Amino acid sequence: MLYFIAAAVLLFIVGVFLAFSRFQPTRNVDRGKFSHWLKSLMRLYCPGASLRFQALGSPVELTVILADAQEVGCQLLLPLVRASWSEACVDGIRHAVMLDEKVSVVADAPEESPSALFGVRVTVPDIWNREAPDVMARVLHRVLDTLGIGSEARFDLVFQGKRSLEQTKQAHRRLKEGLEW
């Protein structure tokens, strides 16, 4: 009888862990790791998934959306949400992100985020290229710099959306072959 109770408690604990572990954020990340986490978004998730960057000790919250994905390429979207911190710096942010020629600024709110002030789109031709996430990472750094959030700032990151089984398998195959995952 005691074994059954112990097994039931163990199953309950494992179930709770599995149910909630998927939604746990990555905590206390520095800006230098943004490319790594953007790479995970592009390579492991389905279109519509997002990665939220919450600046610790600040109301600033940026979300990158995997807006579109093809076999090897994708589009990332950073909508600038309507908030007091963004409205105060909107022109400076727009100017800062337009410095990168690989960036497309959506003049009005993008359809994926209709309440946004504007959006920044980055087309990634090959998600398996080592530098694939770098353009969006630079965009995030420029936005944060414009908002006065320095390079020493820390962030909590939260993935939202469905993981792609096919993309995960492909990443695993590439890793086994010694290629860039």
Image (cartoon, helix red, strand yellow):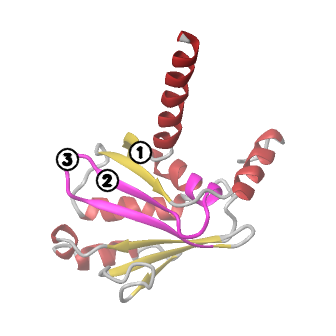
Q: Residue at x 49, y 23 (%)?
A: 9
Callout 3–callout 1 Cβ contact below 8 Å: no
Callout 3–callout 2 Cβ contact below 8 Å: no
Front-lying residue, 170 or 92 = 170
Q: First in sequence: mark 3 or mark 1?
A: 1
Q: What is the three-letter code of the residue carrying label 3? A: Gly
What's the distance in space between the residues labelled 3 and 1, CA to CA?
16 Å
Q: First in sequence: mark 2 or mark 1?
A: 1
Q: Find out whether residue 46 is within the magenta segment.
A: yes
Q: What residue occupies the far front of the structure in this picture?
A: 1
Say few, some or many: other residues with alpha carbon within 10 Å of mark 3 (under 14 / 14 to 19 / 20 or more): few
Question: Residue 1 appears at what percent x and percent y?
Answer: 56, 12
What's the distance in space between the residues labelled 2 and 1, CA to CA?
10 Å
Q: Which residue is mark 1?
A: 25
Horizontal relation, residue 16 to residue 29: left or right: right
Question: Residue 5 appears at what percent x and percent y?
Answer: 51, 18
Say few, some or many: other residues with alpha carbon within 10 Å of mark 2 (under 14 / 14 to 19 / 20 or more): many
Q: What is the three-letter code of the residue carrying label 1? A: Pro
Circle 2 or circle 1, nearest the eye: 1
